[in-house]
Amino acid sequence: MSDLALLVEDLWVEYPARRGVVKAVRGVTFEVHRGETLALIGESGSGKTTLGLALVRLLPKAARIKRGRIMYYRNGTSQDILALNAEELRRFRWQECAMVFQGAQNALNPVLRIEAQFLDTARAHGLSDANAVRERAVELLKMVQLDPQRVLHSFPHELSGGMRQRVLIALGLLLQPQVIILDEPTTALDILTQRSIIEVLRRLRAQLDFSLIFISHDLSLAAELADRVATVYAGAIVEIGSVYDIFERPRHPYTLALTRSVPTVTGDMHPLASIPGSPPDLIAPPLGCAFHPRCPLATDQCKREEPPLERVGEEQMAACWHWREVNP
Amino acid sequence: MMADPSLCASDASPNGDQPNAAEPSTPIIELDHVSRVFEQRRRRVKAVDDVSLAIQEGEVVCLVGESGCGKTTTGKMIAGLIHPSAGEIRYAGRDIWTMGKAEFQRYRLAVQLIHQDPYASLNPAHTVYGIMSAPLLQHGIAANHRQARERVRDLLSTVDLTPPDDFLDKYPHQLSGGQRQRVSVARALTVSPKVIVADEAVSMVDVSIRVSLLNMLTRLKRDLGVTFVFITHDLAVAKHFAWEGRIAVMYLGRIIEVGRTPQVINHPQHPYTRALLSAIPEADPRITRTKERLQLRSLDIPSLLNIPSGCSFHPRCPWFEEGLCEVSVPPLADIGADMRVACHVVARERAKEAA
């Protein structure tokens, strides 16, 4: 597996809460290859953001990684992320792996001009040649379709939401990380702005060599950008496969229901199928398969035993006892 | 620029918007050259600019547009929560701002607004029963708590919160986002409204819940015959909710295109509507990766403080023609097939075809 960029194995993350322990990530295993784009799709409260934070070890203090392994690979060497010390971790973040957060519009320092934010980031990682950094910043800002001369001298509040999002993407790429994690990169942006972010990401991927993991509730974003898609439900990956498998031949009833519940603009009207019930409680997730209370295929077995993520196609895995009955 | 004057005639007559010109009935809601200006630190923000729209009883009209297009302000004016700076808003033919007190109150009950954020619009200190019984008792719809309780139970069942007894004594924080939004809808229904203005009513909830909310609203519309003004930024949602109704697309305070939903979705005329529809990512990799995109000249959204001259879309419009588009504001002109479009280029091409 020489082209592996990231490997997550049996990862469990918990938070203590007043009512009990929130099992936000429950036994997640997946891999990301070099140059690949993986979408983690899930609804609010599915644990997808916690999963993203765990990948760069930015979890809130209260959270606990109960079990699991996160490995990064680069140039034939590997790093166990959960074993890094503070200094190694500081270097790892941004140089190896950058994360652009949800609501990124607020992630920039409001009292610094954009240029200073680029220089600060570089300095914090030991790059002192301001001219070289400036040059790289100009190059990156052009790649994200911004006018560097205008943007570098602006304060964050002088830029629109879409511009700030693009600045953050450029900033994330400053130290040439191998993996970029984007949490809800287009949420809360207007349609035309969303489109420009999508095009920017597409262009960057063609020009630069990095793997992209994005976390979103928006299926259409996955359809646009992802090579592979993982569906997250109740803290676990319930299906993973190529974007075409997931959208055209889903084998998990939840993935199927999700893809059927999104209205499309193109074409005539199709009735939309709704998913009955409500999202699961991560403090006391249902026994057996967490989706069984909402699943049309649920049997007694589903109520008792949690199905493992098993191979259901060449590149596709699903966690369902009845996957053969989904899209037969 | 000298388009056939008859093409523009409908802009002068507020009734030109009627879906069926042969239908003589008075629209239930009518916006007649309505504008709204907000003063902000001595700067004037024109949130809504000269909007005319007539809505028939039982109709569904979606107001669609990006943030800052004026759709929410328009919705609030329809619900009588904001006074227009100019123009008239009529309910069943009567100017709402010249109504007497009793009549105005009847109108306020008849037109109910459902807010975007059910976390903010429900009083956290009251139970579901408290929230819903208040309007019933206040307006004498229920004579006492026993009657109110019965009515609240019925309404909770109507919005699929069943069994209703499970919800009566819950506080908003004990409900999910989808359930809260159902309570908001049920509360609006307490006063048997004729018109519901739903402002991004399904935007804050998850995908799996959104469809059941939309289906529930569709059922209400059919069963109760309520007129809907549905405000959304999501054209796919607009399409599904208003397939049998109309869509009005707004840009920087103006309606730039209005027509039957299938027409607007499948045959958009205004370059802005076209750009929006082509930009939307679709939840189907084959469709979305091969969809034709209309490129804009600029990604920058103009500020409401400094709205471009002439057609306000001209700095971004791929069809921009110098000497035409930045010079005069295109009227919202009838182009046939129940469509009205505010674009100089479209109007000229139509005029050519007609000649």
Image (spheres, helix red, strand yellow):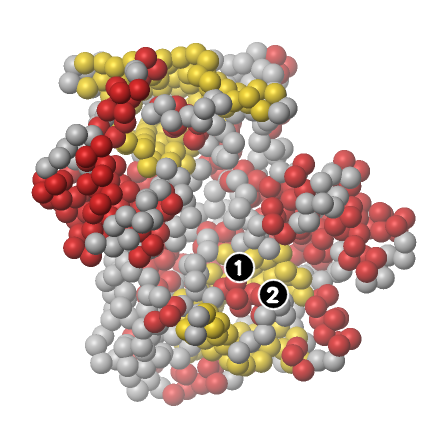
Tell me if mark 2 has few (under 14), some (14-19) or many (20+) residues whose alpha carbon lies within 10 angstroms of its own: many
Is A2 positioned to the left or the right of A131 in the image?
right
- Give SS at disc 2: loop
* Chain of the residue under label 1: B
Are the numbered discs 1 and 2 placed on the same chain, yes or no?
Answer: yes
Can you give x and y, in whole percent of width and height, for residue A89 in the image? 29, 21
Can you give x and y, in whole percent of width and height, for residue B84 in the image? 55, 76
In percent of the image, x 83 and y 57: which residue is there?
B137
Can you give x and y, in whole percent of width and height, for residue B239 in the image? 49, 55
Is A77 positioned to the left or the right of B302 in the image?
left
In percent of the image, x 35 and y 86: which residue is there?
B4
Question: Is residue A85 or residue A39 the one in the foreground?
Answer: A85
Which circle marks residue B231 in the picture? 1
Is B15 positioned to the left or the right of B124 in the image?
left
Which circle marks residue B59 in the picture? 2
Question: Is residue A95 or residue B324 the one in the foreground?
Answer: A95
Q: Amino acid at mark 1?
A: Ile
Q: Let me know if residue B293 appears in the view.
A: no
Q: Let me know if residue B213 appears in the view.
A: yes
Which circle marks residue B345 in the picture? none
Cα separation between marks 1 and 2:
14 Å
* Chain of the residue under label 2: B
In percent of the image, x 26 and y 20: which residue is there?
A87
Which picture quadrant has residue B138? bottom right
Is B104 positioned to the left or the right of A70 in the image?
right
Q: Earlier in the sequence, mark 1 or mark 2?
A: 2
- Give SS at disc 1: strand
Question: Is residue A113 or residue A149 the one in the foreground?
Answer: A113
Is B113 located above or below residue A77 in the figure? below
